[in-house]
Image (cartoon, rainbow, N blue to C red):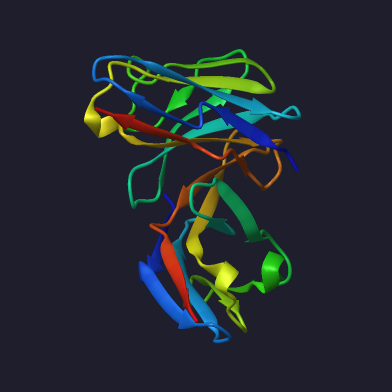
Amino acid sequence: AQSVTQLGSHVSVSEGALVLLRCNYSSSVPPYLFWYVQYPNQGLQLLLKYTTGATLVKGINGFEAEFKKSETSFHLTKPSAHMSDAAEYFCAVSRALSGSARQLTFGSGTQLTVLP
Amino acid sequence: SAVISQKPSRDICQRGTSLTIQCQVDSQVTMMFWYRQQPGQSLTLIATANQGSEATYESGFVIDKFPISRPNLTFSTLTVSNMSPEDSSIYLCSGTSGGNEQFFGPGTRLTVL
């Protein structure tokens, strides 16, 4: 079984400050990990993903995340927050289905507020 | 990437009625998924839909309550049957072409009175 824990349901940062959203996973097999963002009244948009290879992955909008197997973590960071980053962020882990398709299990989400 | 649209975007329904949500993809996808997102909560997978076969439902979800169709590789529907206020949620569909990424629709916001 796979699961994802996001620490902190609400995070507030000042504009220009570092953004750090925490995600820990549990998986019995090497995980594929994802971060999605959901803006108000919209669907989910993929920020970045880790499958294999380089453990530091870069995504859209200046976000990046580092896969740390020893810590079972995949924390999301951005050096300088922008007002437009205010949204709900979901960490997810996937497991293989038949063929090459994969199924996602989501964390509970972190609401990011950016203060002026 | 695939672009996914959903109809309706939102609806207000009376208890005891049913609503069918449509999900259209602009390209062929091998698998489609239906999720429920209750107010202030994360996404919970309802079922996985393959073309030409019965949908696979997750624990706690049954076909009689959430019948799903998948007539081709670009389209699927989810029906929420005999609705109650507890069914008030956002329903999202997603699709994958067998790669590592799922593409999501904008969601259908359902309110049951």
Examine the rendering and report whether any part of residue B11 can be seen.
yes
Task: Name the quarter where the N terminus of chain B is drawn.
Answer: top right
Question: Which residue is pictured at 62% across the width and 18% down the height?
Answer: B51
Residue nearest the observer in this picture, A23 or A68: A23
Residue B4 position, x and y percent, is 65, 34
Residue A50 position, x and y percent, is 65, 62
Question: Which residue is pictured at 49% across the width and 53% down the height?
Answer: A40
Residue nearest the observer in this picture, B79 or B11: B11
Count of picture labels = 0
Question: Which residue is pictured at 36% across the width and 71% down the height?
Answer: A8
Residue B103 position, x and y percent, is 64, 42
Side of A36 where B111 appears, left or right:
left
Q: Residue furthest front?
A: A116
Q: Is residue A100 above or below residue A60?
A: above
Q: Is residue B62 above or below residue A81?
A: above
Residue A100 position, x and y percent, is 68, 38
Q: Is residue B110 above or below residue B53?
A: below
Examine the rendering and report whether any part of residue A99 can be seen.
no
Which quadrant would residue A18 be assigned to in this image? bottom right
Question: Which residue is pictured at 54% across the width and 82% down the height?
Answer: A15
Residue nearest the observer in this picture, B76 or B96: B76
Task: Name the quarter where the C terminus of chain B is drawn.
Answer: top left
Side of A96 where A99 appears, left or right:
right
Residue nearest the observer in this picture, A97 or B100: B100
